Amino acid sequence: MLSTLVWLPIIGSLLIAFVPFKLTAQQSRTFALVISGVVLLWTIRLFTQFDLTNDAFQMHEFMPWLPMLGLNYDLALDGLSLMMIALNSLLTWVALYSSVGSMERPRFFYALILFVSGGVAGAFLAQNLLLFFLLFEIELVPLYLLVSIWGGEKRDYAATKFLLYTALAGVLILTAFLGTAWLGHSTDFSYQQMLQVDLALPTQVVLLSLLLVGFGIKIPLVPFHTWLPDTYVAASPSVAILLGGVLAKLGTYGIFRFGLGMFPEAWSLLSPFLAVWAAASVLYGSVTAIAQKDIKRMVAYSSIGHMGYVMLGGAAFTELSMVGAISQMVSHGLILALLFHLVGVVEAKVGTRQLDQLNGLMNPLRGLPVVSALLVLSGMASAGIPGLVGFITEFLVFQGSYSVFPVQTLLCVVGTGLTAVYFVILINRTCFGRLDNQKAHYGKVSLTEQVPALVLATLVVVLGLQPNWLVHWSAATSRSLVAAVPMTHEVQVAIQPPFQGF
């Protein structure tokens, strides 16, 4: 059942790329959409089979591969994996659907998107450390090509920078995995086997530090973030949706699964540092976003800040903060995908992303009123306005973290205020005022261009009004992760399922 999520997109990508007969751009897009649609429906079916009360891994699939190396095909699912798989399936479909217009080598483009989706799904499901690493790295070259071939200005520079940073992250992660096995005298790289390895605390701290830096580059967190604005800006809107909405979550997923999961004692020791790191990323990302003139770059820097909330929840490792952190990963992916899609539509219709050149898009006759209204909604969601999904996920993180790290939590709350500042600047300068050119009349936004934004906006609103539909899936997993960490905090915040207070 789980293998379908991995192999169907990969097989689909190979068919699109290598079928002997000619496929038009529209036929390639339609075929890719059908494949991603089937994967999305299959993911929805997983929710009906998932046991909410079970904190162990479910739907296990195992097949020996290279047992002499400790590498086996081993997949399973828990609440954390389930949410990430759902996000990957949805945003892959959104990225494919939003890729309208002419492009070079469309078959290759759609094949690479599907291949990345299958690799990422496998990484979220992998229960073998070497298998995770292979699938974690398998998306590197396709994404490099997606940026360097179909990107915008400075795409070669951005793609190369992304490649180098991600390669370095992979080296650090593999070193930590190999070190854990060798020092633990284990020849089996299965995740369950690694949980049984007993290492001295100083050794745990070193190995955890390698994972934190490696996955911190992937998220990315300050100061490992410098590849992000260049890559996100150079990437096409569809690729930016995958980079920010899904690929960044491989970093936080890896930190929680392997850092927190395998080295709980070291995590407890380093948690104050992690909370400071999270607060620094939130403030830096927010302040830097305010200074941007390119709205796509502004959204890119905002991503750094919002991923800091995830790290804060993990650093506090209370049940409530962990549920909030996992939910924030989903919330951030939905909001960021919506923003990147809307920015792409604005650039396609107006011809610029510069705040100094945009004005009056809310004009009902000659502007982009629907896009502007959705842009206002997405800005409000990112700023944490009550009633939208961004509010409840950030509130869960803050509520669960304040008793443990009050100062760092308050600094992150300040970051939400700064988020409101830069989105007010963005909305005020783009949506309101008069059109500078009285003859300006931008092209109509087609239904095809509106559908991805409407789907994402609906989820942002619905999950904001009914957050229990989002948070309760990861409750048991969060409780299991927290239970493994030695409690050094004076206060442990507990929650009772099914979050009846929300």
Image (cartoon, rainbow, N blue to C red):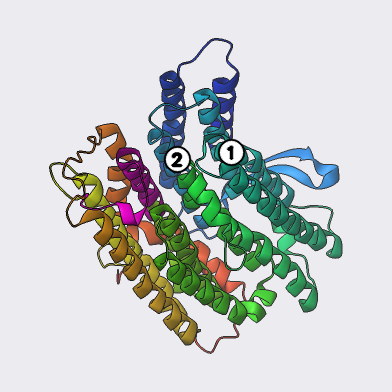
The disc labelled 1 sits on which kind of residue? Ser
Viewer can see residue 49: no
Q: Give the mark nearest the N terminus, 2 or 1.
A: 1
Residue 238, numbered circle? 2
Viewer can see residue 355: yes
The residue under the point 79% across, 77% down is: 202
The residue under the point 74% across, 43% down is: 72
- Please check the rendered image and state whether residue 347 is part of the magenta-colored stretch, yes or no: yes
The residue under the point 24% across, 50% down is: 372
Helix, strand or loop status at disc 2: helix
Q: Is residue 481 left or right of residue 90?
A: right
Placement of 66 over or under 302, stated as above or below: above
Placement of 249 over or under 383, stated as above or below: above
Q: Is residue 486 left or right of residue 359?
A: right
Q: Is residue 163 left or right of residue 369?
A: right
Residue 45, numbered circle? none
Q: Nearer the viewer, residue 140 or 286?
A: 286
Which percent across, then down, holds residue 17? Answer: 58, 22
- Mark 2 in CB contact with mark 1 (< 8 angstroms): no
The magenta stretch is: 335-361
Indicate the quadrant where residue 287 lies.
bottom left
Placement of 483 over or under 387, stated as above or below: below
- State which quarter of the image contains the C terminus: bottom left
Residue 148, numbered circle? 1
Which percent across, then down, holds residue 321? Answer: 46, 72
The residue under the point 37% across, 43% down is: 344
Which percent across, then down, holds residue 68? Answer: 86, 43
Q: Nearer the viewer, residue 222 or 251?
A: 222
Q: Residues within 10 Å of mark 2 (few under 14, many from 20)?
A: many
Q: Main secondary structure of the magenta part?
A: helix
